[in-house]
Image (spheres, grey):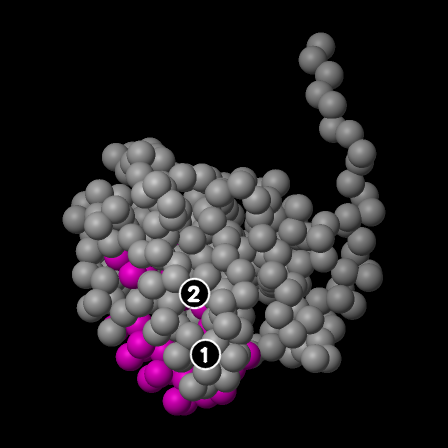
Amino acid sequence: MEKKTKIDLLAIQMSSEIAKLDSNIKKARMLLEESLEKRQVDFVILPEVWTVGWDCESFPKCAESIEEAKSIKMLQEIAKKYSVNIIGGSFIERKQNNVLFNTTPVINRQGELICTYEKNHLFSYYGCAEGDYITKGNNPILVEIEGVRIGLSICYDIRFPEIYRSYRKANADILVNVAAWGADKRIPWDVMTKSRAVENQTYFVALTQTGELKKGANLGHSMVIDYKGDVLSEIDKIEGGFYATIDLEEMYEFRKKCKILEDIKKSYEVLVK
């Protein structure tokens, strides 16, 4: 298939009920169908742990094997019905020996699961204990769909710019961070998402959950950011879909004029004096 250079995106911001897998799947289906009936798009993105909500203690009882996951089956049905590629946020994946991962599934227009990404950095601060329940993933995943290269990341990964620089060096076109980001950390969210876009000259989809938690709340304020740091599309605290059209040719022309990767030194050894 010829590489797409203009891409229509749909991102779904939602509030998940804690540990209510079936209810969350039903809500996600409703939001997806409601948005996809309005407008045809190339890619859909969902937020982190939309299946269970951000509650680490609930992760084990809501975990699904990838072969039997009801959440993935629903996304596959949506992908085929609307002929759309889906970056499926994340779900709690149960592997052999009851090992759990925070996993992003990627599904193509034919409803095929083409790859998964396991969260590389686990958030275990401020009363959260993700690392007590979830196993850390080993590698960044750059998935190529219809010639478009997309770098995958989940929430706390955003604090590690190394992963995004690696994606850029591997010729990423779009960077995606799916999250369940706390409402009390608005400034880091705004600063880091835009910084990752600017420093890598890459479109950035920053998608988080909204709504209340057992303690505190999710931020909302999801965005699609261009390669210069401008916000193309955003949504505040409401649930629903929002759209953006991105132009890869425009981004490539900008990169030709400002070749920042060529200015990276081979070594940044620090001299202490």
Q: Residues within 10 Å of mark 1 (few under 14, many from 20)?
A: many
> Disc 1 on helix, strand or loop?
helix
Is residue 106 visible from the viewing direction of this image?
Answer: yes
- Picture quarter containing residue 270? top right
Foreground of the two, 263 or 104: 104
Q: The disc labelled 1 sits on which kind of residue?
A: Ala
Q: The disc labelled 2 sits on which kind of residue?
A: Gly
Looking at the rendering, the stretch of residues picked out in magenta corresponds to: 27-52
The spot of residue 149 in percent (x, y) is 65, 63
Which label's residue is closer to the chain start, 2 or 1? 1
The spot of residue 198 in percent (x, y) is 63, 54
**37 magenta-colored:** yes
Q: As drawn, which residue projects farthest toward the front?
A: 96
The residue identified by callout 2 is: 88
Residue drawn at the location 65% of the way across and 69% of the way down:
148
From the viewer's perspective, tell me whether residue 60 is left or right of residue 223: left
Quadrant that contains the N terminus: bottom right
The residue identified by callout 1 is: 79
Q: Residues within 10 Å of mark 2 (few under 14, many from 20)?
A: many
The spot of residue 53 in percent (x, y) is 26, 55
**81 magenta-colored:** no
Foreground of the two, 14 or 82: 82
Q: How many marks?
A: 2
Residue drawn at the location 41% of the way across and 89% of the way down:
38
Residue drawn at the location 25% of the way across and 73% of the way down:
27
Residue drawn at the location 50% of the way across and 57% of the way down:
116
Is residue 239 visible from the viewing direction of this image?
Answer: no
Distance, label 2 to label 1, CA atoms, is 10 Å
From the viewer's perspective, tell me whether residue 146 is left or right of residue 181: right
